[in-house]
Image (cartoon, rainbow, N blue to C red):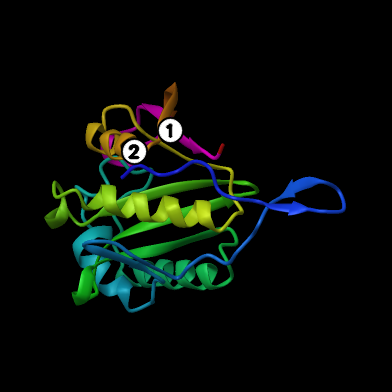
Amino acid sequence: MRLTRTVPRNLDVASGTKQRSVRSLRTELIGDRLTLRRPLAQDGRELHKSYLSDPACARFLQRSAFVEEAHSVRLLARLGEALLANGEGMFGWVITIGRTDLPIGLLTCIAEGQAVQIHYGLARSHWGKGLATEAVGLGTQALLECGRFDRIYTTCAAEHTASRVVLEKCGFEAERLLLKALTLPSLGEMPSDGVRYSFIRK
């Protein structure tokens, strides 16, 4: 999914300068196979079983697999509330399969002024189907359209080839290699190299 980097801005007649047109973040993003929607506390139970507690899904993350279901429930509730508050701090969408509304993953965002950091993942049973690419494309487009962010970025493990392919398919560009920048609990105590990817509005 290739995304446009140019988003229209309104002209301030008095000053003659272009001003940012800011809109609320959408709480539902509909794609060909997926729907990204506002997370609910009850999604935490399903995602805990299929995604958040799975060590394989946490392999390249800067967290361990969750142990307690209550932790997953609290996370989903927090993300949903923040999305309704128009993306203050950490917010996100739950990734669901079309009409079934089955939660299969998360797209999490951390707002940092006019930049936003993203993280994403899917339950293992849905790997290798191109769904992560669709989810990241939908989320990136929504973040650009809201008008708040000029830069969307993430840092993924250098050896996480699948994630790097997803980002590149969505138009993200590799900025630089970050040596020993990531602590990945699943891979042990030694820091891992990361690659910073970004999508910059032009």
Q: Is residue 16 above or below residue 176?
A: below
Which corner quadrant holds the C terminus?
Answer: top right
Q: Is residue 188 magenta?
A: yes
Left or right for 193, reference 149: left
User: Pointer 1: residues within 10 angstroms few (<14), some, or many (20+)?
Assistant: many
Is 170 displayed left or right of 8 in the figure? left
What's the mark number on residue 197?
1
- Circles 1 and 2, Cβ within 8 Å, touching? The answer is yes
Q: Amino acid at mark 1?
A: Tyr
Query: What SS does tag 2 mark?
Result: helix
The residue depicted at 50 percent of the width and 54 percent of the height is 143
Foreground residue among 168 and 187: 168
Residue 182 in sight from this viewpoint: no
Q: Residue at x 37, y 55 (%)?
A: 138
Percent of width and height locating residue 199: 47, 38
Helix, strand or loop at mark 1? strand
Q: Quadrant of residue 174?
A: top left
Give whichever of discs 1 and 2 has the lower sequence position. Answer: 2
* Residue found 57% across the figure and 52% down from its top: 111
Query: Identity of the amino acid at label 2?
Result: Leu
**Residue 63 versus residue 105 in the image, above or below:** above
Residue 152 place in picture, x, y as percent: 50, 43
- The residue labelled by disc 2 is 167
The magenta segment is 182-201
The local crowd at label 2, few if under 14, some if 14 to 19, many if 20 or more residues have their Cα within 10 Å, is many
Can residue 146 be seen from the camera position used here? yes
Task: Pinpoint residue 77: horizontal percent, then vertical percent.
Answer: 44, 73
User: Quick check: 117 left or right of 101?
Assistant: right
Question: Does 53 lie within the magenta span?
Answer: no
